[in-house]
Amino acid sequence: MTDGRKCAGWVAVSALALVSACKPQASGPAPVRPYPAPELASTGDMVAKLDDAKITGDEFTKRLVGQGPSAIDRMSDPARRKQFLEEQVRFELLAREAWAKGFQDQPDMIAELKKAIVQKYLRTVLDERVDSLPISETDLAATYQANHAEYNKPATIRLSQIVRRVNNDGDRKKAHALLERLKAEILAAEKKNKPTAFGEAARDNSEDEGTRMGGGELQFMNKEELTGKYGKEVADMMFEHAAVGDMVIADASDATVLFKKTGLRNAVVRTLEMVKPQLRARVQRDRRNMAFDALFAELEKKHGVTYDLDALNRIPLGNQGKIGTSTRAP
């Protein structure tokens, strides 16, 4: 038996223990709570017995089916059948012995049981409140529109730049002359199989300190972003006319720039029909989150939950004292 299935069996045993513990007890010594023996299939030949419990052929098959198809395939070997049966018996023997010694009442066991109960309760309640509700085409369309940018992304390009700052027409003329010369030198170097030529030229000549040491590289930008940074003329040129690898000299308000188009990412277009499975999952998740919040609001109201955040913030932490030590305000 796998560790996960052993834990599941132990949680089931502990759950019965906690239920029994919650019942009012008569005065005097607490009676020993009986061990919650598992319900076993009664049909089929008996293959093992411990105390008053009998494991029959049908019970063996039921437990084996729970292990999955691969486990069933391995059971053609008699030795593996015997091993699996012994694992079931040993697990039950250990559970009974642990119960007899009171392990089910230990705080760490009760804490683990509470975790399992909470998970089961949440799954059950949220399934009842959410999973039975149909998801309409209107729900899907509304979710698609609300998250349109996530499913549809515009084309983006990546540029590298060499920037020369200008204050007047004279500066701009000199900048053009320098960038034309650099463009020719870069093209010549690239023809000689030197792909780092533009980056080296940017580090030596660019006056944009934010990108100079990185070889003039910019992040990928869509057309709207590039328009906002350098204007419509530059955006139109680099998106519509320049191919990857092309270099273009353009004027900005306070600079003249040599651009090189170094990358292109095509637009991503996903229609409503294409993303319906993701939309259904998203609607379901959003509904469960809302149901989760509503459930806790109901429970807090039902049980009169209040918070004292001032007291919470007075708890000393770290070097100020032991975590969890309470203090009173002076």
Image: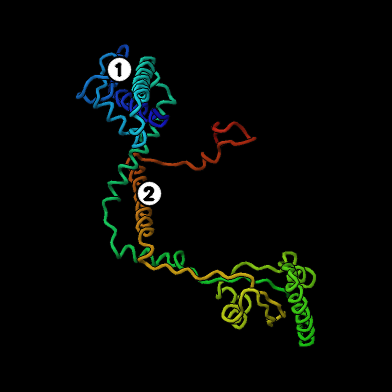
Q: Residue 29 falls in which quadrant of the image?
A: top left
According to the image, what is the colour scheme of the structure? rainbow
Q: Residue 208 falls in which quadrant of the image?
A: bottom right
Q: The residue under label 1 is which amino acid type?
A: Arg
The tag earlier along the polypeptide, 1 or 2, is 1
The residue positioned 74% from the left and 68% from the top of the image is 194
Residue under circle 2?
293
Closer-to-camera residue (73/265): 73
Task: Give percent across and percent down for residue 228.
Answer: 59, 76
Q: Is residue 282 left or right of residue 224?
A: left
In the displayed image of the protein, which residue is found farthest to the left? 43
Task: Give percent across and percent down for residue 270.
Answer: 42, 67
Can residue 5 be seen in the rendering of this structure? yes
Q: Residue 187 falls in which quadrant of the image?
A: bottom right
Q: Is residue 245 left or right of residue 96?
A: right
Closer-to-camera residue (162/294): 162
The residue positioned 30% from the left and 33% from the top of the image is 65
Quadrant of the image containing the N terminus: top left
Q: CA distance from mark 1 to mark 2?
A: 38 Å
Quadrant of the image containing the C terminus: top right
Closer-to-camera residue (24/202): 202
Task: Give percent across and percent down for residue 189.
Answer: 76, 73
Q: The residue under label 2 is which amino acid type?
A: Asp
Alpha-carbon neighbours of circle 2 within 10 Å: few (<14), some, or many (≥20)? Answer: few
SS for tag 2? helix
The residue positioned 67% from the left and 74% from the top of the image is 260
Residue under circle 1?
33
